[in-house]
Image (spheres, grey):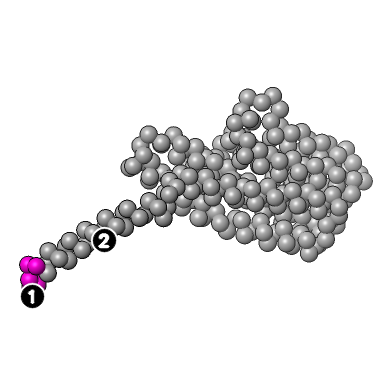
């Protein structure tokens, strides 16, 4: 350029190459995990937090929770849902990584995308359940006659989510999977609510069946069988 000597240009160009090489070299050590590894680590962490929240809600329902406790659950569930955009960003990063760099891992990227959607749908349903429990605490509460079955269903959902993350290989081919247990618990809860409809307030029945519906969606998501897990369905 004008005003620059040849030696200055060569010096600056060489410094640029040295800086670029140094940045590329040390970037591996600053991010030793691949985008795929980081995406799974993040979504599994979100899933474990969701499972822990379901377990706490199960214990709270069984022991007779208060509005303050329900408000805490709702706040935590909202915090988890607010992290979902970051999960989507990481999933998109995995797709770009396998599209241009690791072409042979495209199938793994697609599976990570489906897993991401499964966790996303699960966390959204957990938030809805937390809101239902909060509304129930303000209103007429959970029906006493269905309190035990509601707690069992929430506990089954917590276990199904944990097993989906930590023991996925053991679930494949099992005669009775954790999601099957969840559906059985849901069926028992539905039967209690319906068969005792004359003894339970209508608002309590509606809230109870709403929780059943949310848990069914969680089961379908964890099975990766829901049509809603198609990432083109937004």
Q: Which residue is drawn at 70% across and 50% down?
A: 52
Residue 141 magenta: no
* Marks 1 & 2, CB-CB < 8 Å contact: no
Q: Main secondary structure of the magenta part?
A: loop
Look at mark 2 in the image and give the residue it sits on.
Answer: 19
* Residue 121: image location, x then y, percent: 60, 46
Q: Is residue 27 at all visible to an observer of this figure? A: yes
Q: Which residue is drawn at 36% across and 54% down?
A: 27
* Residue 82: image location, x then y, percent: 57, 58
What stretch of residues is rendered in magenta? Answer: 2-7
Q: Is residue 206 at all visible to an observer of this figure? A: no
How many neighbours does mark 1 have within 10 angstroms: few (below 14), some (14-19), or many (20 or more)? few
Look at mark 1 in the image and give the residue it sits on.
Answer: 3
Q: How many discs mark residues in the rendered view?
A: 2
How many neighbours does mark 2 have within 10 angstroms: few (below 14), some (14-19), or many (20 or more)? few
**Secondary structure under the numbered disc 1 in the rendered image:** loop
Give the spatial CA distance, label 1 vs label 2.
Answer: 24 Å
Q: Which residue is drawn at 41% across and 36% down?
A: 105
Report whether 18 appears left or right of 197: left
């Amino acid at each position: 350029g004008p005003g620059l000597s040849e030696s200055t240009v060569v010096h600056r160009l060489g410094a640029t190459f040295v800086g670029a090489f140094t940045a590329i070299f040390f970037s591996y050590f600053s991010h030793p995990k691949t985008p795929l590894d980081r995406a799974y680590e993040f979504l599994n962490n979100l899933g474990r937090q969701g499972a822990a929240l379901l377990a706490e809600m199960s214990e709270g329902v069984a022991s007779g929770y208060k509005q303050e406790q329900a408000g805490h659950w709702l706040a935590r569930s909202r915090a988890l849902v607010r992290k979902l955009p970051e999960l989507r960003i990481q999933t998109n990063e995995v797709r770009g990584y396998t599209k241009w760099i690791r072409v042979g891992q495209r199938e793994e990227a697609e599976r990570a995308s489906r897993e991401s959607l499964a966790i996303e749908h699960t966390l959204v349903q957990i938030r809805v359940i937390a809101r239902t429990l909060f509304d129930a605490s303000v209103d007429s509460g959970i029906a006493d006659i269905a309190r035990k079955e509601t707690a069992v269903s929430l506990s089954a959902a917590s276990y199904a989510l944990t097993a989906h993350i930590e023991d996925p290989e053991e679930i494949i081919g099992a005669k009775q999977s954790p999601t099957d247990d969840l559906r059985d618990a849901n069926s028992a809860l539905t039967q209690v609510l319906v068969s005792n409809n004359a003894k339970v307030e209508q608002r309590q029945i509606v809230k109870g069946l709403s929780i059943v519906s949310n848990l069914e969606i969680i089961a379908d998501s964890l099975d990766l069988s829901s049509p809603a897990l198609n990432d083109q369905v937004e």
